[in-house]
Image (cartoon, rainbow, N blue to C red):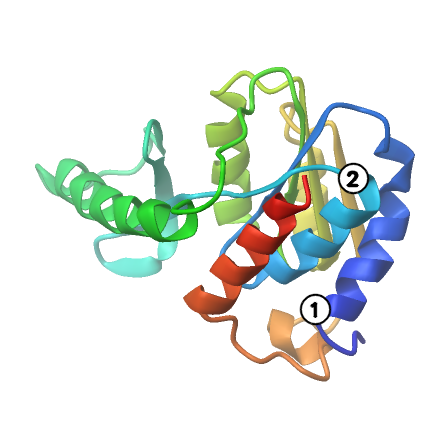
């Protein structure tokens, strides 16, 4: 059990100190992953950016990810059958949302390149791991040197699935409880992170670089 995301960030950062000294970029997954990523970036003295990507949900079950989209790239499960034009329509819609977020988040913040970096992708927890796996694919497309996934809590089965992915160098997870229902159950304080809070964290973190 974590007191809040700040507590989770400190605990996670201590496990990631072994990577200090590498050419690191910390990517926080909006919005809940950003406060955790902020703490890690401070410990590692690394820049902090945001993983701007969003899943494409199945047309008959939006929670089930069949792909993911960033502003530059996309990953689609070739085994999924969808109505004609659905992927193109969803991709265009998602990129509109991501474009707005990009303008909000990076208005006063420099974008750090991923190429040849050790990229540490951080969230406040993972449930199924589908969206994280797709985020990893999108980051790998930008020619990172290596990718590390780091989270405070996730089901053991999800962590095993991520560790089996060739593109991930290492998965760091502090707790893998058996009775996992939702990420929030493992935080005493799991208050929602607003866009304004996330932007404030990002701007402050980068002003110290």
Viewer-nearest of discs 2 and 1 = 2
Confirm or deny contact between disc 2 and disc 1 (CB under 8 A). Answer: no
Image point (67%, 52%), residue name: 37
Mark positioned earlier in the residue sequence (2 or 1): 1
Q: Is mark 2 on a helix, strand or loop?
A: loop
Residue 176 at least partly seen: no
Choose top left, top right, bottom left or bottom right for residue 136. Answer: top right
Q: Which of 99 and 60 is in front in this view?
A: 99
Image point (77%, 48%), residue name: 42
Image point (43%, 43%), residue name: 52
x%, y% of residue 86?
A: 14, 42
x%, y% of residue 142?
A: 49, 20
Residue occupied by mark 2: 45
x%, y% of residue 180?
A: 68, 71
Q: Nearer the viewer, residue 188 or 159?
A: 188
Q: Nearer the viewer, residue 186 or 95?
A: 95
Residue occupied by mark 1: 5
Q: Which of 128 and 148 is in front in this view?
A: 148
Image point (89%, 41%), residue name: 17
x%, y% of residue 15?
A: 88, 47
Tell me if 149 is positioned left or right of 80 in this view: right
Choose top left, top right, bottom left or bottom right for residue 163. Answer: top right
| CA–CA distance in space, label 2 to label 1 | 19 Å
Q: How crowded is mark 1: few (under 14 residues within 10 Å), some or many (20 or more)?
A: many
Badge number at residue 116: none
Image quadrant occupied by the C terminus: top right
Tell me if 203 is positioned left or right of 107 in this view: right
């Amino acid at each position: 059990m974590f007191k809040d995301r700040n507590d989770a960030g400190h605990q996670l950062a201590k496990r990631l100190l072994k990577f200090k000294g590498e050419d690191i970029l910390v990517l926080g997954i909006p919005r809940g992953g950003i406060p955790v990523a902020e703490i890690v970036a401070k410990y590692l003295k690394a820049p902090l950016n945001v993983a701007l990507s969003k899943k494409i949900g199945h047309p008959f079950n939006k929670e089930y990810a069949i792909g993911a989209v960033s502003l530059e790239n996309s990953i689609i499960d070739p085994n999924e059958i969808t109505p004609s034009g659905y992927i193109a329509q969803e991709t265009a819609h998602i990129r509109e949302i991501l474009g707005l977020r990009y303008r909000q988040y990076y208005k006063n913040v420099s974008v750090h390149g991923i190429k040849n970096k050790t990229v540490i992708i951080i969230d406040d927890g993972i449930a199924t791991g589908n969206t994280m796996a797709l985020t990893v694919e999108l980051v790998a497309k930008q020619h990172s040197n290596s990718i590390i996934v780091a989270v405070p809590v996730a089901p053991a089965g999800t962590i095993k699935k991520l560790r089996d992915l060739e593109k991930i160098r290492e998965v760091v997870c502090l707790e893998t409880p058996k009775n996992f229902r939702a990420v929030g159950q493992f935080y005493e304080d799991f208050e929602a992170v607003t866009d304004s809070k996330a932007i404030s964290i990002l701007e402050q973190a980068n002003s110290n670089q």
